[in-house]
Amino acid sequence: MSTATATPRTVPHTTRPQSSVSRWANHNRKWVLAAPAMIFTAAMILFPLGWTLYLSLTNAKGSVRAEKEFIGFDNYASVFADTARFWPAVGRTLFFTGGTLVAQLVLGMVIALLLRKNFRGQGFVRIAVLMPLVATPVAVGMMWRLIFEPNIGIVNYLLVRMGIPAQPWLAGENTALPTTMIIDIWQWTPMVALILLAGLTSIPEEMDEAASIDGASAWQRFWHVTLPILWPSVVVATLLRGIDALKTFDILYATKGRGGGSFNEVETLNVYAYGLSFDYNNYGIASAVLILFFGLILLALFLLVRGNKVK
Amino acid sequence: MRTSPGYRIFRIVAIAVLIVVMLMPIFWMVLSSLKNNVQIFDVANAFNFDPSLENYRNVLARSDYVDYIWNSFFVAFMSTAISLVIGVPAAYSMSRFVMRRSALVVLMARIIPGVSLLVPWYYIFSNLRLVGGYSVLILSHMFVALPLIVYIMMGFFDGLPIDLEEAAQVDGLTPIGAFLKVTLPLSVPGLATAAILSFIFSWNNFMFALVLSDAGTKTLPVAIFDFIGYASIDWGGLMAASTVVTLPIMLIALFAQRYVVSGLTAGAVKG
Amino acid sequence: MKHPKGAAIALALTTSLFLAACGGDEGEGDSSGSDTIRVTLANHVWTDTIKEAIPQFEEETGLTVEITQLGEDQLSDQYNVKLNAGSEDLDVMMYRPLQEGKLFATNGWMADLTERVESNADWDWSDFQEGPKSATTHEDTVVGVPIITEREVLYYRKDLLEKSGYDAPPQTLDELKEMALKIKQDNPGTAGFVARTARTAAVTQFSSYLFSYGGDFEVDGQAAVGSDEAIAAYDMYSSLIREAGPENVSTDMGWPDSMAIFQQGQAAFLTEADSLYRNATDPEKSKVAENVGFAPFPEGPAGRRSYNIPSWALGINEGSQNKDNAWKFIEWATSQEQALALQQAGNPSARNSVWENAESTKNDPADLVEASKGSAENGVGHDRPLVTRVAEAREIVGQPIVDGITGKDVAESAQTAQEAFQQFLDSE
């Protein structure tokens, strides 16, 4: 410990002379400390959000600097009436998010329970579990593209060797979305598992043992003892993963490119909005979709937090 | 607690399967990066080939990859450092004064769809003459790093007893002084966690770098797309490039495992 | 962490210094007439070739060339964001005249090059082919200089044709289909035919089928993809793939994917742009290099009507403060000398003098040269709808292709596309 920090302790109960700036800063420290981060975030969000809102009410097309007219809520009306692209994209977004979330929670729980007790080599296993999680998503997308390649991919090769017909995977109209979900599940289940594992280690084992002595089956113990205590961790995992799953972009872009394939088969709201902006240069509609998308995320968040409070 | 032998065997098998599923794809990527394109197409002889570092040589020679590695590193480092400087005090204040609503403002950055920010940001930054350098990338990556840091550090400060700070204030330190001289030194594990996590997320970021970087500042995830060109799809090069991007992060995860895990699971225990 | 406060201050200081330093870098490029030319190029053989020659240009002129190289989609995204924001930090842009050209020019993002192209008689604008030139001219204003031209040709496997008893490539599309089906039958596991299948990617290669059946995407501003000719063309293209194509065919294949199948020896015919031929004849990329033959695009009911288009061009950003130097770069990169060297490296030029020079094609297979010439005769100057928002249009007119490949009713799908395309044209 240096003398600089030690000095005040040797002279207790005396307040060192303070400059007025310091006094003011300390008095208002709540905001002084929080302000830079809040101002930065607000500055980075407010203008884009306001601008997007504004554009969503105009017929901006081609270039955002081109002349545009104020057209009220027409964009929203046409988006809502768009059963070809918008609603399917909403459906895919929800399907993707719901599907991956459920799979990740179930698998993550299984993995967490498997790894719960100490065992030899657990350090290695934890590292193995960590790897998908930290790998760069774009690189992960490329990697799986090769693995799922219908003609040269290892997956189809193995399937055929086992006598199962080859699948189109990412290339198929109906299989592409589930395949991207598999990739997402591969990459993010470890995160759920680690969160749940952290929650599990905070549960004293005696509780489990006591229940076990009472004659409860493993399933009953899990359902009545472990899960209720673990519930906060489940909620956190759901929140964190849910938001990110709704906004998934990197993997979809890396595997299917823009527009999400020939039948828009993996076109989620995020991909659709990106395409509307950068492919179609249809900024008015794109902005309306983005605002609705943002609203959907907020709604999902609200429902999750609310549902949890009720419980 | 005793477990049945049946369960024990099941557990060992399950863990083995888990390891294979988690690591096989990555192994496959690295394996493919050591092959030329003809070998990659020859799946039947996947393990029977002469490994070559040719792809890596191409990657490093062909497209200024060393510069891209530096760009990725510099942007991730700077965005992490600045986010720590502004994010940690904010997290402290938000934790101590229970400013949940203010915290939501910062966390909003995690929720908003990035697509809606790209064009407006570019517009502002180019009017501020910030485009074309690192600053615009660093600012955009801070947008990713900051909420992460605030979130992790709030959790950390929540768990740190307030008594020590109060004692230090009784000893004559100002509240901010107590934060800097007492709380921060105690927070090194939390800081390490937050810093490593934010570094990883910045390194991996694709969408912002895709549109906001250019020749001099291109980061690795964007550079991967050099290998899907109009003139050829170079699987070997693509896999080598993907390996180069992912490797540093995996090494960090390997050596700082504890911090990465505690960062990813932050908030899980208290809920 | 002995002096946390000091450490924090030091960190903050270094940080701001760094930021200031990076800020400083940017200033240089913005001053007008800077010595640094910022050139954005697509991943392409052309780019690889020109990059090798750039040091020579830098030496001759004392200028510095700073290259950003991107895949075509990423390139397009970057242009969109940057040009939308009125960016100054793009000077020379490699762009696709038929894809982005009209949008960029309509938005006023492309600098007027009319005077520049006409001022240098040695460089000789009149040497460029008319078709490509018209594609880089917007409302009588020259906005780009074409660098690469393309035609659709038929790639085929000499050995497989011989095995099935054919001694010449097909002359007509009907013959093509017949031969492809027979070869597929004779060689289990090998496809008779392959081509692009992705909705937007396939449109350009489909266009030659459409033209050869006497159709077009639009006629005088009216959508024409529902016409009988168009339906027949859609049917031919998609049934070739559905019936004679690979098993489990995906509807995601751009040219790299369909080319890969051909390279692997898994298909007998491929209709593709001639500019990509090296992928088929380079033994390092292709297993079938020595057995590849080339023929002109087969004839349809309306004769042989391949596209003949400039796929890429160089233009200057209207917002650039460095237009004079940017032009110097373009002038150099498109000079007779460079065009010849580039064509020898496999980039079909837009200059007549290069094509007339026997040196330019001496490295190319003789049948390819003939095939390109055959496809160029009677060629059509576009391979996709000529509209502002091309990407959206391609999705609409490409839908019947993928619907056909997956076995849906082509006529019905073409009718739907017709309505959607008409609506799109009305909103242009």
Image: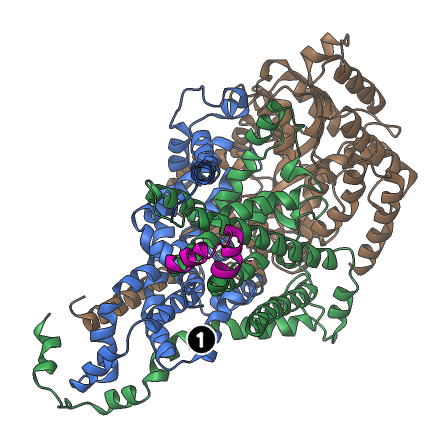
Q: Residue at x 40, y 57 (%)?
A: A198
Q: Position of residue B182 (x, y in %)?
A: 21, 74
**Colour chosen for chain C:** brown
Q: Which residue is mark 1?
A: B103
**Colour chosen for chain A:** green
- Chain coloured blue here: B
* Residue C247 relative to residue C303: left or right: left
Q: Which chain does tag 1 point to? A: B
Q: Position of residue C155 (x, y in %)?
A: 69, 22
Examine the structure image and report whether residue A220 is included in the region drawn in magenta. yes
Q: From the viewer's perspective, is residue C320 above or below residue B223?
A: below
Q: Residue at x 51, y 32 (%)?
A: B235
Which amino acid is tagged 1? Answer: Ala
Considering the image in quadrants, where does the C terminus of chain B appear?
bottom left
Can you tell which quarter of the image residue C204 is in? top right
* Residue C283 relative to residue B75: left or right: right
Which is more toward the observer, C361 or C72?
Answer: C72
Q: Which residues are magenta?
A: A204-227
